[in-house]
Amino acid sequence: MGGAEVSEQAKGGPAPVVPGRRSGPEGPFPFRQFIVKMHGRCNLACTYCYLYEGPDSSWRERPAAASAAVLERTAHRIAEHAARHALRDLALVLHGGEPLLAGAGPLAAVAGRVRELVSSGCQVHATVQTNATLLTAERLAVLADAGIRVGISLDGGTAAHNRRRVDHVGRPSWPAAARGARLVAERFPEAYAGLLTVVDPTLDPVETYESLLGLRPPALDLLLPHGNWSAPPPGRTGVRYGDWLCAVFDRWWAAGRREVRVRLFEECVALLLGMPAATEALGLAPFDAVVVETDGSIEQVDSLKSAYPGAARTGLDVFRHTFDEALRHPGVAARQAGAASLADQCRACPLLRVCGGGHYAHRYRAGHGFRNPSVYCADLQRFIRHVASRLAAATGGPASGGPALGGPALDGPAVGGPAGNGQPVTGPAAAGPPDAGPPDADPPDAGPSVAGPAVGRQPAAGPSATRPSSAGATSAGATSGHRSATGPSVTGTPSPSATGSAQAGPTAAGPTSAAPIAVGPAPGEPAVTGAASAGPAAVGAASAGTGAVGAALAGAGGSAGPGSGGVVAVWPVANGSGAAGTVPIGEGAT
């Protein structure tokens, strides 16, 4: 898979935003991630690829490579959009298929042309997402000289992990891909954006994670396979995917230092602390990515093609239409509407502000559209509650299911009354209105929906919440230089809204003078009573109120011990709309 997700706020990005539609003359949130299909074919034939093996075959009708005319017009349209919205930074994602089939020179030329056309006040962060099989020292030198960072799609760090990534005659891609990945890490580390990996629950989670560390990525993006209620993801039973993510999170958290930035984990921690974040997988940040196909068509992101044929189509193209016209497309508008576009049971859920309904493509069901909970609803609840329990332990949250001190538990509508005693709430709040989505939209093993007070506002996060790190690693994907945490490409400096400073290495963490976080453990997990072990995310409740999950998490028994020092600071995206977008960089076909 290749794709387009990513992102984070660049240094000097705009002020934090509130999810939802903008008021005023500027209208919708502008696009800030531009995914340009350099080549529409791939040299691999991965058996699980939703783009080439899925329901949408529109790639067959398009030219293999983007023409010079398409690329020139696209560059002008990007500059036009950036000028109209006074963008101070944007992400240019050179994509495919396998974009290196177009050659490194054309990729460098496109990045150079966009930089030439945008105003001097707009920084262009260019990234290429590749399967790494075509990487050579010569091509990497061209990309690095052009300021293009390299994100790599792999399923693990061994041949066995990548058994489904084969070429068109069935030969394994691992030898060439491993050679390319090691070449970037060893000789061009400044151009290494990171790795993107699709979760495979049949693989050992910790072994997979540790094998990826062997490739020395500065960042790692973990993506759930694209599936929906009508075409469920493979092997989806119980909370198998959620358990997999929890196992990797525990390994990452317990390392005592940041071995690698994992976008999904850091974004989840940020959202639980009430900080803004930008990722398509979690939260309510407005969507800000757009795709230009090889024929110049303007489309929504590739992940929608996993739902049904034509799902990503807008009917627009760069020759006759502006990107502002694409912003007015109903599909884009729905994805910028925040909670208003979600199913009723999602809007009633106390995890709303953290989960955000999950990835948009995962909500689809034939005959019902996208206004449903995620097909991964139970897995997301399992993962979020697990992270919250670890966070409570690290911040010395109040014991046994008590309400959050000094701040709201979650930002969302009150559901079922104040159940601050750690007991699950039953009734409509837990299950959602009967007509809110498909009959099986709320998986039976999702656990109780609420066990504590929900609240009606998002707290402000002050310097004492999570603090930005001075070391800017990248996430595997679409953004480059100076980004914080969204997705397969992220690197660099945190945005200015995340105030405070921290060292790149271990730094003291723990509850501040403000209210600590109150969280009950995930269902089936024991209460944490001792000092929290050091993890790679710095925590400490925000001085202006916390974003604690509090007793809203099912189960009783929060942490009763103080958080230990020696944890590395999390610096989440400080703006709900990342310059590199909120699209998963695993959206394409590499």
Image: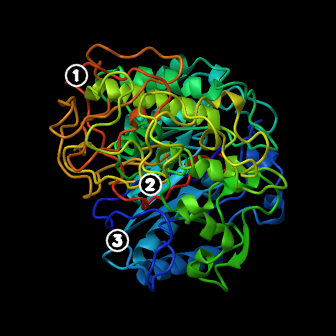
What residue is shown with label 2? 479
The residue lying toward the viewer, choosing from 284 and 313, is 284
Left or right of 458, for residue 92: right
Mark 1 or mark 3, which is nearer the start of the sequence? 3
Residue at image mark 3: 88
- For residue 400, above or below residue 220: above
Cα separation, mark 2 vs mark 1, equals: 36 Å
Please determine whether, in this image, residue 197 is positioned above or below residue 323. Answer: above
Which residue is at 45% across, 86% downward? Answer: 25
Q: Secondary structure at mark 1?
A: loop
Tell me the residue that label 1 is attached to: 562
Residue 170 x/y as whole percent: 80, 31
Residue type, numbered disc 2: Thr
Distance Cα–Cα, label 2 vs label 3: 14 Å
Q: Left of 13 or right of it: where is 244?
A: right
Q: Is residue 50 above or below residue 94?
A: above
Task: Give the crowd class for mark 3: few <14, some 14-19, many >=20 residues within 10 Å.
Answer: many
The amino acid sitting under disc 3 is Arg
Which of 228 and 44 lies nearest the eye of the viewer? 228
Report the front residue among 175 and 97.
97
x, y (%) of residue 460? 28, 54
Position of the N terminus by quadrant: top right
Q: Amino acid at mark 1?
A: Pro
* Left-right relation of 1 to 492: right
Of circles 2 and 1, the one toward us is 1
Circle 2 SS class: loop
Considering the numbered disc 3 on the image, is that residue within a helix, a strand or a loop? loop
